Amino acid sequence: MRMQKGWTMQVALLVLGLLSLMTPLVYAQDQRYQDLVNEFIQEYNTKSGSENLFRLSILNLLSGENNDPAAPQLLSFTMRETVCPNTENRDPDECDFKENGVVKECLGAIGLDSPKPSANISCDGPEKITRKRDFPRMLGRALIRIGNLLLRV
């Protein structure tokens, strides 16, 4: 019994060790997507004419059936209005989110298969943070847009 318990512990440690080797690779890939989304938000801040800066709130990489690394990765993200005026040349990550500020839900596909990554991202209109009960409707719209993106890809 004691021998079996020790063997089980060794297998568990081996599996955890192997998983820890994969984590930096996954993190590096996820970081590239986050960097590209932040570039999109920076461009949005430049061109939107919005009174305040927006910054990333939530990023979700949507897992799909396709394991081809050359295929675009579907993602959704939320960007929220901050308290910093859009006239300032500052990093939005240094700004607090504005209470009851505008929230934008965005969907898109990003391809990392070339030196210059491609992105096809669209965002919905303004929504206030206080409208929490509309989450099911937002989720339904997001799923419809994901389906439309999949049909285009």
Image: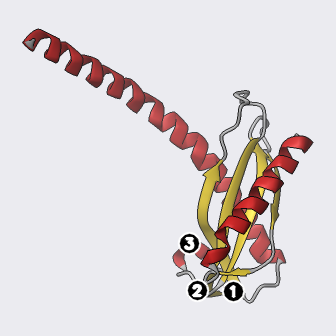
Of labels 1 and 2, the one closer to you = 2
C-alpha separation, residue under disc 2 versus residue under disc 3: 13 Å
Is the residue under label 1 in contact with that under label 3 (CB below 8 Å)?
no
Residue 98 is labelled as: 2
User: Which residue was labeled with disc 1?
Assistant: 52
The residue that appears at 66% across and 66% down in the rendered structure is 78
Answer yes or no: is residue 5 visible: yes
C-alpha separation, residue under disc 3 versus residue under disc 1: 13 Å
Residue 93 is labelled as: 3
Secondary structure under the numbered disc 2 in the rendered image: loop
Residue 102 against residue 43 in the figure, above or below: below
Q: As drawn, which residue projects farthest toward the right?
A: 152
Is the residue under label 2 in contact with that under label 1 (CB below 8 Å)?
yes
Looking at numbered disc 2 in the image, what kind of residue is underneath it? Answer: Lys
Along the viewing direction, whichever of 139 and 126 lies nearer the viewer:
139
In the rendered image, residue 60, in percent from the top left (x then y), is placed at 62, 53
The residue that appears at 61% across and 75% down in the rendered structure is 92
Secondary structure under the numbered disc 1 in the rendered image: strand
Of labels 2 and 3, the one closer to you = 2
Looking at numbered disc 3 in the image, what kind of residue is underneath it? Answer: Asp
Q: Earlier in the sequence, mark 3 or mark 1?
A: 1
The residue that appears at 61% across and 87% down in the rendered structure is 84
Q: Is residue 30 left or right of residue 66?
A: left
Is the residue under label 3 in contact with that under label 2 (CB below 8 Å)?
no
In the rendered image, residue 140, in percent from the top left (x then y), is placed at 75, 60
Q: Residues within 10 Å of mark 1 (few under 14, many from 20)?
A: many
The residue that appears at 67% across and 65% down in the rendered structure is 136
Q: Residues within 10 Å of mark 3 (few under 14, many from 20)?
A: some
